[in-house]
Amino acid sequence: MHLAGIKIRQWREAHDPPLSAEEFGARYGDPWPSRTVYGWERRGKIARAKVQKTLAGMGVCEPGDWLEPAPAQSSSEDEISPRKAPRMSGKSHPFYDLRQHGMVRVATSTPKVRTADIDYNVEGIVAEARRAHDAGVDLVVYPELCVSSYAIDDLHLQHALLDAVEKGVSYVVTASAELAPVLLIGAPLRHNGRIYNCALVVAKGALLGVIPKSFLPNYREYYEKRWFAHGREIVGKTIMVAGSEVPFGTDLIFAAENLPNFKLFVEICEDYWAPTPPSTMGALAGATVIANLSASNITIGKSDERHLLARAQSSRAVCAYVYSASGHGESTTDLAWDGQGMTYELGDLMAESERFSLDAELSIVDVDCERILSERQRMQTFNDAAEAAGRPEDWFRTVEFALADHENPRGLIRPIRRFPFVPGRQHKLDEDCYEAFNIQVDGLMRRLEATKAKSMVIGISGGLDSTHALIVAAKCCDRLDLPRSMIRGYTMPGFGTSDHTKSNAWKLIEAVGITAEEIDIRPAANRMLEDMDHPFADGEPVHDVTFENVQAGLRTDYLFRLAGHHSGFVIGTGDLSELALGWCTYGVGDQMSHYAVNSGVPKTLIQYLIRWAVGTEQFDHATDEVLLSILDTEISPELVPADAGGAIQSTESIIGPYELNDFFLQHTIRWGQRPSKIAFLAWHAWKDAASGQWPAGFPDAKKNEYDLATIAEWLEKFIKRFFAFSQFKRSAIPNGPKVSAGGALSPRGDWRAPSDAVADAWLKDLKEGLPPSV
């Protein structure tokens, strides 16, 4: 250890609340992964000269500190913890507590071990348990047979070792009395003249239960059937361990009485390589979190295989999957070990440990058990599978326990996507954007083929939505070998149309190469306003909803008549975000079209797809220049003239930032989250622009942050618009393709709701769930 590592940790923890290693690296690095920060703090690794200079400039540590040994009293394992429980600076309201929102903090641990050295191994297990306790962890999953070691072959049959194992288990159980986390440890245990490869569930000074391994590998490098008996048929049994009789079997669910959504099932290593993993039945019996204690020696490509299995099982079994493999310290007589730990939730990788580390590892993340149950409630296939399996919940045994309370709320250790509709997989980014764009293109292609239309009619405003609809239509023509001239674009300037957007509209039309005309709607709008005896017709500056809707309605009216005149159909440009908020004119207005190509795409995704189209050169350079200019334009319906200072009508100043509204929307329609929880997640996602991950290539100038009061203000307006106002518009929307797994709002698809509902329940939850100071 060096002095620089100590100073970095102290500097992080001096923040209120303290910065995690991940947050520190993301905020001040380029970014620095958490494992890199831990390497400096705990393993004595030396940073590059450039990094040393950066940290010196921040006042964190000096270059000479990297060569200065750390003070002896500062280098103990107890002192250096990966994540201390954050001090909440007075934020003691339940809103800030992750458990209030149905979450549980889990960790995978790779403790320090030595082959067949039980005393050393249990000390390593307890040391990691203490670190997990300091980090506010609820559940720690250790590797398979971590008490005895896995790769000890015939030593598993030695009574001296087996006796020592039981004493070691007793030591861990006793030590756990002063620790908060539930500990899952692995040990060989004797029962009725057999030895079983077991997982033991330990909490608050008690052994809660023991689970035997179901499937024993006995091929290639594995010989487990030489030593162990399988436990597939062990149900309803008990076992004596260190003088205590506890439940024993593969039919055990461990349920937290003070967090009803958290139910735990345990399997061991090979079990999830089997065609029928025991965890499938465990999930069908009600478990929301599956833990796997694994040894799993490492070979080339095996890490990917583990990821594949964990991801697939967490998705198929609709659960969280917490996997912990053996690391350094296991015997390398014939095998090697990498200590891989990972947690998946509903198919998403939430956290992963550093592999091949010489030091103990804790990989910590908060799992959303409530989200898991929400998905099961929607997915009737899950319930059907439980029924087909004989309702395992009726015969599985439940072992209840109480999670330890924590003195303060613990913040949140969980990746939260600011833009949940935007592709978030960096290594799959191009593929995901390609899919999203071509879902729209393919949908439009089929509609064009089915209608045998001779033209596609579209209104071009120079704004985001019509721009995206146009480039989708252009790509549709290209794919079908049709001339782009069959696209008929119309600019229809009104009373609020700016020179900038009108100019961009024409530049885009010319760059894409479509047939285009301009129809000034102001004369027709004036005539309609005169016929209605509207004050604007008499020269009064009355820019009310009627004034706006006259213009929106005229534009749509023209487009429909032009489509009929040119044997074509109208392409709708309105997007998913506008449908959610009701930010469209109903009937004879932008809510209606013949095919709504953008109806499944939210505003934030449209912005990103346009950037992707530019970045991947989907079109020529001239088109790209116009697209970039449109991306930088203020979002506005341009229905009201600019004010005396030249400021134009701003959509987001009226209905709120689209980036927040899209966040609210996804968590509402995809997961059914209560508003208070959405506010909690949004606050953690958006409170600090310098922390967390942004979509690749996202402009720095557009990286915003919002405090809780601002989030709550716009969330309240979202609730009113979404639940109490705008459903009647969604109930009559035209056809359009679903694009994102995050959901769509077609009444024929993802979202069906009454048009006359009230929003009282959601507003009440938000008001009661937020701290009084907000």
Image (cartoon, rainbow, N blue to C red):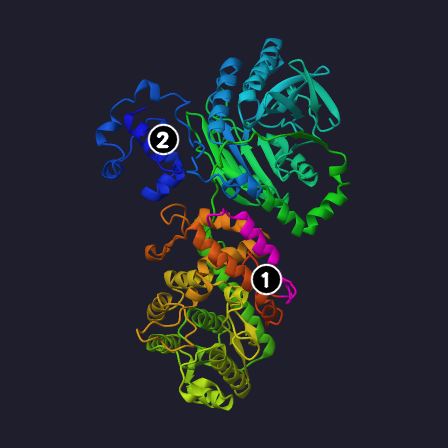
In the displayed structure, does residue 427 sit left or right of residue 100?
left
Q: Which mark is residue 39?
A: 2
Q: Residues within 10 Å of mark 2 (few under 14, many from 20)?
A: some
753 up-or-down from 213: above or below: below
Place of residue 10 in the rendered image (x, y in percent of width and height, measured from the top left): 33, 30
Place of residue 386 in the rendered image (x, y in percent of width and height, measured from the top left): 73, 43
Instruction: Examine the rendering and report whether any part of residue 111 can be seen.
Output: no
563 up-or-down from 466: above or below: below
Which of discs 1 and 2 lies nearer the camera? The answer is 1
Q: Is residue 55 magenta?
A: no
762 up-or-down from 645: above or below: above
Quadrant that contains the N terminus: top left
Say which of 325 and 178 sits in front.
178
In the displayed structure, does residue 168 sit left or right of residue 17?
right
Query: Pointer 1: what residue?
Result: 723
**Element type at marker 1?**
helix
Instruction: Examine the rendering and report whether any part of residue 126 can be seen.
Output: yes
Q: Amino acid at mark 1?
A: Phe
- Cα separation, mark 1 vs mark 2, equals 49 Å
Query: Magenta residues, as a range?
Result: 747-774
Residue at screen point 54% across, 48% down: 769
In the displayed structure, does residue 774 sit left or right of residue 203?
left
Place of residue 767 in the rendered image (x, y in percent of width and height, measured from the top left): 54, 52
Q: Amino acid at mark 2?
A: Gly
Q: Main secondary structure of the magenta part?
A: loop
Say which of 22 and 641 sits in front.
641
Place of residue 15 in the rendered image (x, y in percent of width and height, measured from the top left): 36, 37
Q: Residues within 10 Å of mark 1 (few under 14, many from 20)?
A: many
Q: Is residue 767 magenta?
A: yes
Residue at screen point 58% across, 54% down: 764
**Element type at marker 2?**
helix
Q: Residue furthest top?
A: 160
